[in-house]
Image (cartoon, rainbow, N blue to C red):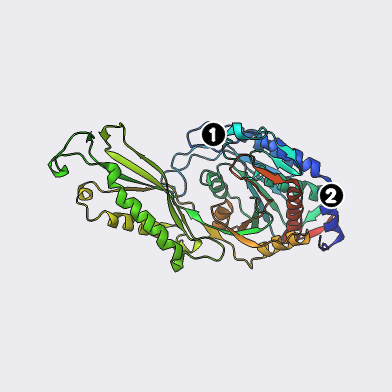
Amino acid sequence: MTALRSALEEKVVARIRDRRDELVALVGELVACDTTSRNYNEPARDEEKLQTILARRLGALGAETDLWVPEPVREGHRNLPPGMRFDGRPQLAAHVAGGAGGRSLLLNGHIDAVDVEPRADWTSDPLVATARDGRLYGRGVNDMKGGIACLVTALEVLREEGVRLGGDVVFCTVTDEEMGGAGGFAAVEHGVRADAGICAEPSALNVEAACRGGLPITVTALGRTGHAELAHPDWREGGPVNAIEKLLPVLLEVQRMREDWRTRPDHQHPLLPPGDIVPTIIAGGTWVVTIPHECTVTLDVTYLPGHLDAEGTGRAVEREITDRLRAAVADDPWFDEHPLRIEFIQDVVPAEVPADHEIVQLALGAAGDLGHDPRVTGLDTWHDAATFTRFGTPTVSFGPDCENSHAVDESVSIDSLVDCAAAVALIAMRWCGVRGQT
């Protein structure tokens, strides 16, 4: 471990190392809460229970806690499904007061975790955090209940050691990150913000300073039903039209776009792969001997921060996709009367924090001082840090290591959890400043 900057920093790090078992126990308490990511119409699970656990711990530090249930998503919200409700899924913001005039720091995490299936393939119960050979196993141990436990532990140790920060800390845990970041949007709309932020997504103590955005869409071709085993007249004379076949030129154009984006200059980024467009779901047909009257393909679209327009949206990417798909079927007269139906589901907006931003450099320095060799990296997918960044709180993801995120036997190194908690404490001290000790 590199020498720390002060005896106080050394004392804080040592205390966090002493709390190793308590940190593991807190991860276990959070993992035991079933907060499986939902489809929008599913009932609440243990979200309120988990948020209450966190609120009580933060309240014990003297934090002002705010547990609130957001209003349903308004009509016309570009980034979230209209009408989505949060019943039984509160968000949490806890305000830990520091000195007047110091810089504030956001500490963020999402409490939802993906489904455990196939549950029978797990080596141990996925809702019981189980330690084996220096690693902790269970759903959410790295993505990202482990990171949340690190944030809590860092704040608790700072308070135990009497560290008086020069600026405020805003602790915010949200729901629904895995389903498009609804909780993060609810938080910024509620007024959660700070001068900079750390999202404890698993990053192996690298600093994830950029991420791609997402534009999931559905493309539907209409047809005309008929018996699949009979001879029919031309469609112009009332014959059937196979909707699955009508989607073929669309899928070919999607393939061409993928190849184009891989090499096009505007799709290149030093930390991120090019944007992509991937068919992920296809649905069409009702009976084995019936010509399908409708077929829909769902496309997972990712795009880069550089594609955002002046309003901070991905509309330019939407226009390119729409124009190219419509052009792909322009020579088919069927589509003159039955146009493709192209529906953009949600705009999950990318973001980027410059590599030379102080919060990036402080995170790198904290990990380095604990003996790691961190890098500035990008996240191929998306994280809540992008939402806070977009709305004025430059936020990076910085968390423990991960193995098998979203898969069977998800795990995290216990040493990595301890170092993450220690690094977060150092970042808080260095960003907010230290006014002294009580």
Query: In the rendered image, which quarter is residue 311 located in?
Result: bottom left
Q: Counting residues from the N terminus, which is met first, the one under dot 2 or under dot 1?
A: 2
Question: How many dots with numbers?
Answer: 2
- Give the residue drawn at x 55%, y 44%: 178
Separation of disc 2 and disc 1 at Cα? 39 Å
Residue 56 shows in this picture: no
- Give the residue drawn at x 22%, y 39%: 224
Reply above or below: 245 against 323.
above
- Of the two numbered discs 2 and 1 in the rendering, the one whose residue sits closer to the viewer: 2
Query: In the rendered image, which quarter is residue 407 located in?
Result: top right
- For label 2, the crowd category at 10 Å Cα-Cα, with few meaning under 14, some 14 to 19 and many 20 or more, is some
Determine contact: label 2, label 1, CB under 8 Å: no
Q: Nearer the viewer, residue 300 or 357?
A: 300
- Give the residue drawn at x 54%, y 40%: 70
Q: Which residue is mark 2?
A: 15
134 displayed left or right of 208? right
- For label 1, the crowd category at 10 Å Cα-Cα, with few meaning under 14, some 14 to 19 and many 20 or more, is few
Expressed as whole percent of the image width and height from the top left, the position of residue 386 reads 56, 55
Expressed as whole percent of the image width and height from the top left, the position of residue 154 reads 76, 49
Q: Which residue is mark 1?
A: 87
Expressed as whole percent of the image width and height from the top left, the position of residue 307 reads 45, 62
Residue 207 is marked as: none
Quadrant position of the N terminus in the picture: bottom right
Residue type beneath disc 2: Arg
Give the secondary structure at mark 1. loop
Q: As drawn, which residue projects farthest toward the left?
A: 237
Give the secondary structure at mark 2. helix
Residue 183 shows in this picture: yes
64 displayed left or right of 272? right
Q: Nearer the viewer, residue 212 or 106?
A: 212
Residue type beneath disc 1: Asp
